[in-house]
Image: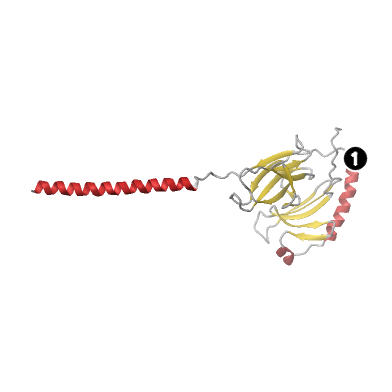
Amino acid sequence: MSGRRHKYLALICVLCLRVSEAVRVGNVLIQSEFYQTQLPSAEFAFQFDDDELFNVNYDKQETRWRLPQFGELASFEAAGALQNRAVLAQNLKIDMQRSNNTAAIPVTPIIHVFTEEPVVLNEPNTLICFIKQIFPPVIKMSWLKNTQPVTEGVSDTDYYFASDSSYYKFSYLATIPAEGDVYTCSVEHAGLPDNPTNRMWSPDVPSHVPETSENVVCGLGLAVGIIGIVAGIFLIFKGLKNNQNRGH
C-alpha cells in the first residue's frame, strides 16, 4: 500500500428502469446511492435522463427536490434512504474484510472551466468548474482569483451519477470579470497526478478600437466623401461647359 490515504467504497447500488408506457421509449430512471468511509459518507438520489429529480439530506432526514414543482407532483420518504444507508454500511464492512482492506482504484477526473453567459467585461457573470469521470466520489474543489482564495459567491452541487458508473459535479463562482483577472479552479482527487490540479481562466474579450480612433476614422471618411462630392460636381460643370463651347 502506498502512503496515500485509503478510500474504501461500498458497492454502488444502481437501479435502472426503462419506462415504456408513461413516457417515450428510451427514457431511463436511475436510483443511485453510495456509502464510503470518506466524506461525503453517503448519498442517495433519483435521476431522470441524467437530470436529478431529488436527493436525500441525511443530516436533516429530508427529501430535497431539484425543483419545488417536482415535490408537488410526487413524494418520497427519506426514511427509505436511511434504511438503505444502514444496509450499505454493513455491506461495506463485509467487503472490506473480504478484500483485505483493498483501496478503491481511483479514476482520473476531467476538469473544464467556462462561463454561464458570454463574457462582457465589468458585467456580472458566473464561472462554472465542471468535473466529470469522478471515482471514488471524494473530491475537493476551490476557487482562486489572481492567486488569492475566494469563498464569497461560491456554491457546489451534489455528486451526479453518470452512465459509466462514475460521478460528475459542478462548482459555481459568481463574479464580475475584469481585464487582467485570472481565475483558477483548484481540484484535489486521488486520481489526479498532481494535487492540487489547477485549471485557469481569464476573460478573452475581442479588443475594440478606442473611441478616439473611431472618431478619427469617421472624420477621415466624411472628409473623403465631401472631397469626392466636390470633385464630382466640378467635373459635371466642366463637362457641361465643354459641351457649350462645342455648340458655339
| 155 and 165: which is toward the camera | 155
Q: Secondary structure at mark 1?
A: helix
Residue type (three-letter) at the residue carrying disc 1: Arg
Residue drawn at (71%, 47%), measured in percent from left and top? 163
User: Can residue 197 be seen here?
Assistant: yes
Q: Colour scheme in the image?
A: secondary structure
Residue drawn at (29%, 49%), measured in percent from left and top? 229
Total numbered labels: 1
Q: Is residue 120 left or right of residue 52?
A: left
The location of residue 134, given as percent across then percent down, is 75, 43
| 112 and 160: which is toward the camera | 112
The location of residue 158, given as percent across then percent down, is 76, 52
Q: Residue furthest bottom?
A: 72
Mark 1 sits on what residue? 98
Q: Is residue 85 left or right of residue 220?
A: right
Residue 204 higher or lower than 67, as above or below: above
The location of residue 210, given as percent across then percent down, is 50, 46
Please identify the quadrant where the N terminus is shown.
top right
Q: Residue furthest top?
A: 2
Residue drawn at (43%, 46%), measured in percent from left and top? 216
